[in-house]
Amino acid sequence: MKTQERAAAEARFVRPIHKPQDEIGTQSMGSPRKAGTLTPKAIILALLLTPFLAGNNAAAQDLARGGVVPLHTIPSVQWIERVSGDMDKPGLPFVIRIHHDAGYVVLPHTHPEDENITVLKGIWALGMGPRLTMSELKPMEPGAFGFVPKNSEHFGYAKVETVLQVHGIGPFVNLPVDPVFELTDKGVLSKPSLVRPGVPTSSSPPDCFVLKMGARVRGVRGEGIVVGGLCSPANRFTQYWIQKSNGERFWATLQAVKAL
């Protein structure tokens, strides 16, 4: 059971606008395992030289003289919209919007600088710590604010399709606490960053992905085909990215879908 001191400390990280009504799962995942032998500075430098996912390189708007950036519809294949500043430049302020499809679990990771999170659309949740423990998530509805100090291990969950607005000081890099692997049409890749493309690896666990690309499945959010996946062996957790016939996408675990 948590002590009163720990509960009070964790309460600093999320500022809801009201108490949400929904509960988010209680499953606790495995123990953490530190990834790699490179220093954090070396990893960050390498990641800053790596292109972002499709759509992430759209230039931020020039707001030097003021202005308004409306809330756009962000496609499923695009993870990040640049709003203001440059998230890649050390020491400079930035604002970005992050899109998550319904059901997406953000695996434990850290950032080299403080992260300030505001929910613009959907229902998100923030948890602190190196282990993916769903019962530790603090729900955040639109308007809620979350704060993560630099180098603090944390994770998240998008109950429905969600858009977050994140601001802070660059560089903005997502460093997984433990090795993460990605299922793609190019095979299984390693993920040095959660928001950047995977890289080839020869050490992916053979039992990470039971379902393969193109597998047809059905879950509570509908029927579709597997178009991707993420696996964290240390947390004993795998999730699949599923695309429905109308183009909509969602995330689900193996236990939440049935192969057709």
Image (spheres, rainbow, N blue to C red):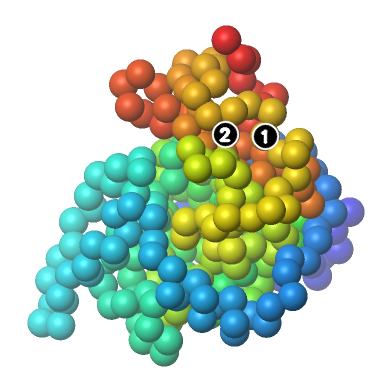
Q: Nearer the viewer, residue 135 or 73?
A: 73
Residue 120 numbered mark, or none: none
Q: Position of residue 138 (x, y in %)?
A: 62, 52
Mark 2–mark 1 contact, CB under 8 Å? yes
Kind of residue at badge 2: Tyr
- Can residue 167 be seen here? The reply is yes
* Marks 2, 1: nearer the viewer: 1
Residue that sits furthest to the front in the current view: 202
> Quarter of the image holding residue 199?
bottom right
Q: What residue appears at the point 18 percent right and 62 percent down from the top-left corner? A: 69
Question: In which quadrant is the N terminus drawn?
Answer: bottom right
Q: Is residue 201 left or right of residue 160?
A: right
Q: Which residue is mark 2?
A: 240
Q: What residue appears at the point 22 percent right and 69 percent down from the top-left corner? A: 60
Question: In which quadrant is the C terminus drawn?
Answer: top right
Residue 209 numbered mark, or none: 1
Against 100, residue 168 (above or below) is below
Q: Secondary structure at mark 1?
A: loop
Q: Secondary structure at mark 2?
A: strand
Kind of residue at badge 1: Phe
Q: Callout 2: 10 Å neighbours few (<14), some, many (20+)?
A: many
Q: Is residue 239 left or right of residue 232?
A: left
Against 224, residue 36 (above or below) is below
Q: What residue appears at the point 80 percent right and 58 percent down from the top-left corner? A: 32
Residue that sits furthest to the top in the current view: 260
Residue that sits furthest to the right in the current view: 1
Against 53, residue 41 (above or below) is below
Mark 2–mark 1 Cα distance, whole angstroms, equals 9 Å
Q: Position of residue 62 (x, y in %)?
A: 15, 75
Lower sequence index among marks 2 and 1: 1
Q: What residue appears at the point 34 percent right and 65 percent down from the top-left corner? A: 96
> Quarter of the image holding residue 238?
top right
